[in-house]
Image: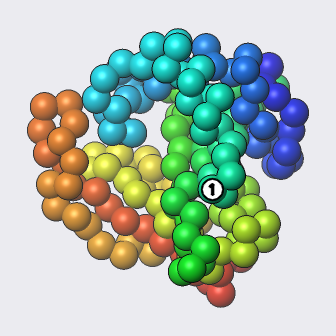
């Protein structure tokens, strides 16, 4: 069971990342269905995931990570990263375990995290990056009203080939959460 619920949704909750979540996060990020979509190139050990938890799960730079919970079970994670106070922007990053794909959980988690970024961190612009071929993730951001800003061709090398990265954003004035 994830840590305490911080943001309650209709079907998903965003919970504080807890030490008990380390095993789930490590297993999910190493899942062959998940890691290519998030740009992972090497497997993460339990020790590395624990170090991430201890150092970065929540830090003083404004980065915030949540466990996405469905019926009190961990389903994935979403984070607000790259917080830029000067320009008022932040980036969202999400991954879900494969059993939770296709049921709208990512869309709801994205909506909750975007609202959180605007309402609690006074962001002006929220961005999300999606690797080529991750059509489901592109649909999530498009459903939420994010606009495609552009595509960086062959920006990342993952799983034996170069991939384009699609950049999406929504402005505070456009968000109706």
The colouring scheme, among rainbow, by chain, secondary structure or one colour, is rainbow
Q: Percent from the top left, x then y, of residue 155?
A: 20, 55
Say which residue appears at 72% left-offset and 75% top-offset: 122
Q: In this view, does 173 lie above or below 92?
A: below
Q: Percent from the top left, x then y, of residue 143?
A: 55, 63
Q: In this view, does 61 lie above or below 30?
A: below
Q: Which image quadrant: the C terminus?
A: bottom right
Say few, some or many: other residues with alpha carbon within 10 Å of mark 1 (under 14 / 14 to 19 / 20 or more).
Answer: few
Say which residue appears at 69% left-offset and 65% top-offset: 117
Q: In the image, is 10 to the left or to the right of 125?
A: right
Q: Which image quadrant: the N terminus?
A: top right
Residue 97 quadrant: top right
Query: Which residue is nearer to you in this view: 108 or 163?
Result: 163
Q: Residue furthest bottom?
A: 173
Query: Which residue is nearer to you in this view: 99 or 35?
Result: 35
Q: Is residue 66 visible?
A: yes
Query: Which residue is nearer to you in this view: 116 or 175?
Result: 116
Q: In the image, is 146 to the left or to the right of 40?
A: right
For label 1, the SS is loop
Residue identified by numbered label 1: 61
Say which residue appears at 56% left-offset and 30% top-offset: 52
Q: Percent from the top left, x then y, of residue 48?
A: 49, 20
Residue 35 quadrant: top left
Say which residue appears at 61% left-offset and 34% top-offset: 55
Q: In the image, is 30 to the left or to the right of 90?
A: left
Q: In this view, does 42 lie above or below 173?
A: above
């Amino acid at each position: 069971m994830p840590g305490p619920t911080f943001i309650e949704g209709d079907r998903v909750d965003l919970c504080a990342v807890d030490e008990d979540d380390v095993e789930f996060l490590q297993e999910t990020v190493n899942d062959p269905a998940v890691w290519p979509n998030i740009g992972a190139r090497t497997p993460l050990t339990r020790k590395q995931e624990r170090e991430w938890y201890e150092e970065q799960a929540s830090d003083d730079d404004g980065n915030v990570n949540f466990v996405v919970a469905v019926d009190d079970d961990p389903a994935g994670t979403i984070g607000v990263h790259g917080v830029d106070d000067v320009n008022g922007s932040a980036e969202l990053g999400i991954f879900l375990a494969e059993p939770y794909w296709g049921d709208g959980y990512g869309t709801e988690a994205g909506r909750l995290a975007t609202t959180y970024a605007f309402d609690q961190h006074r962001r002006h612009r929220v961005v999300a990056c999606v690797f080529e071929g991750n059509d489901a993730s592109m649909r999530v951001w498009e459903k939420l009203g994010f606009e495609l800003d552009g595509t960086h061709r062959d920006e990342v090398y993952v799983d034996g080939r170069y991939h384009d990265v699609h950049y999406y954003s929504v402005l505070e004035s456009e968000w109706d959460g």
